[in-house]
Amino acid sequence: MAPLAIKSVLISESVDPCCKTILQENGIEVTEKHAMSKEELMAEIQKYDGLVVRSATKVTADVINAGSKLKIIGRAGTGVDNVDVDAATKRGIIVMNTPNGNTMSAAELTCALIMSLSRNIPQAAMSMKDGKWDRKKFMGSELYGKVLGIVGLGRIGKEVATRMQSFGMRTIGYDPITPPNVSHGWGVEQMSLEQLWPLCDYITVHTPLMPATTGLLNDDSFAKCKKGVKVVNCARGGIIDEAALLRALESGRCGGAGLDVFVEEPPKDRALVNHPNTISCPHLGASTIEAQARCGRDIALQIVDVVRGKALVGAVNAQVLAGTFSPGSHQWIRLGESLGGVLKACTASKAPYSQVHVTSIGEHLKTSTGFLSSAAVVGLLSGTLPNGPNLVNALPLAAETGIPVKTSHEESGVREACVVEVSMKSIRYKAVGSVQTGVPVLLELNESVFRQPVPLSGHLIFFKATTSSELLLSVTGVLAAAGVAPESFSASTAATGDHWYCMGISSLLPDIGALKSLVKEAVQLTV
């Protein structure tokens, strides 16, 4: 991947000082402005290429669209529900988080809440501060032999499991992504939620907040749980239905809740917080010295790696870029964009496209199909959209405009190549290209194979005509009359019919219509 030009970054919240230091040491100008209103942030963000936030800054679509220079949004933490990822993707902006930054801190807080629920530690401490000595009131229960249900078996869920197993707890869990054999390796037996609910003495949730997980623990699921089950949420407010939880606490169906997160933060409705069987924290999951230092350092290093074109870590919306950091990938990206550009020029009067099909050929391009297809769409859509497509938003923009993009891969021992084919009703155009000695070249255009590969750079003119002895002389005459000098020439071979020709020229023709009277098709472009 080509290095991303990030010259200035705004940090809108309190992030560990190492974040600013690392960015500045790598030549990035950093400005810190905290506690801005939405309007203030919208006015300020126009100046910056990058934005670093924690969880308080709401990076809405309005904020993203106000950031005309914005290329990257870094979340110093795990969850990105405070960032409109869809709006960022549409703008071609990379959104990244620090997936490992607060894992240990969130896992330890979860374990602390489980232990506090089992022994009523916060309530007993407050009672002592009130001058009381009430041992019977705070009778607890052991964790040994109890069943802990873990919903969400990612990094944090795994760390919670291994720690609570040391207390002799049986750990069971549910996760639609983590394979059961993987979680079994660290002592968690997976099962469906319907099987899990009635077995648990304690339940802890570690999922992102999304439609599928909102209200995951609700009236129906509480009704299926053991009477007196205790629940913990250090993930995101809303995964446990707060109204249903309050009803379960009041009825005794739930024996206690440890909450670090709420739907509204800080919560205005204090019913849950004030309930005697609830232990509440003000979203402290990542609030440790170590986690803050780790998140600040990680997000800064991740941004620097992207700026240098070294690696992409923690991107939540730009997975297509993952394969663009291998040696030589930049030239293949240029090839994909150039092939798309050539076909766009050839089909300018024939759109809209009914399908785009991108094929990678050769073993070494097996993992490159994703970014090649994005690159080709960038070339096809270039100049047609206000903000311009890039590798991040090309495929979503194609889908939005109703262009289906098909990708495939073919093994071949002959050559590595990229094939881009566009269809428009009954018309089809195909371009085949490769990278030779570090230079993107066009090999074929609509089944016409060029005798000499066409370097895809500079000003190019393509024309289709029947071969004749006067053709080349007539074309050069049109160029000369316009003050345009030919710089290179490549003819193609075709089994029958017309041939495609390509000329490298000193500048584009002011009016290509003069050439069209001599040939059947003619297009020009700058690559």
Image: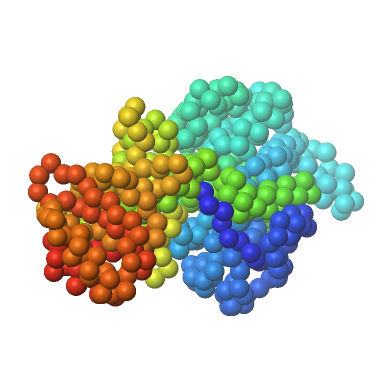
With respect to residue 440, does 343 lie above or below? below
Q: Which is more toward the observer, 316 or 441?
A: 441
Q: Is residue 108 visible?
A: yes
Q: Position of residue 484 (x, y in %)?
A: 32, 70
Say above or below: 270 vs 171: below
Task: Pick the residue in front: 219 or 294.
Answer: 294
Left/right placement of residue 423 relative to residue 223 reads: left
Residue at the spot x=23%, y=50% of the render?
Answer: 491
Question: Residue at left 39%, top 71%?
Answer: 386
Against 462, is 437 above or below? above
The quarter in which the C terminus is drawn is bottom left
In the rendered view, does 248 fall on the left or right side of 513? right
Q: Position of residue 51 (x, y in %)?
A: 61, 63
Q: Quadrant of residue 58?
A: bottom right
Q: Position of residue 306 (x, y in %)?
A: 59, 51
Query: To which quarter of the image does residue 256 belong?
Result: top right
- Give the quarter of the image for residue 121: top right
Residue drawn at 10 percent across, 44 percent down: 496
- In the depicted view, which residue is nearer to us: 85 or 322? 322
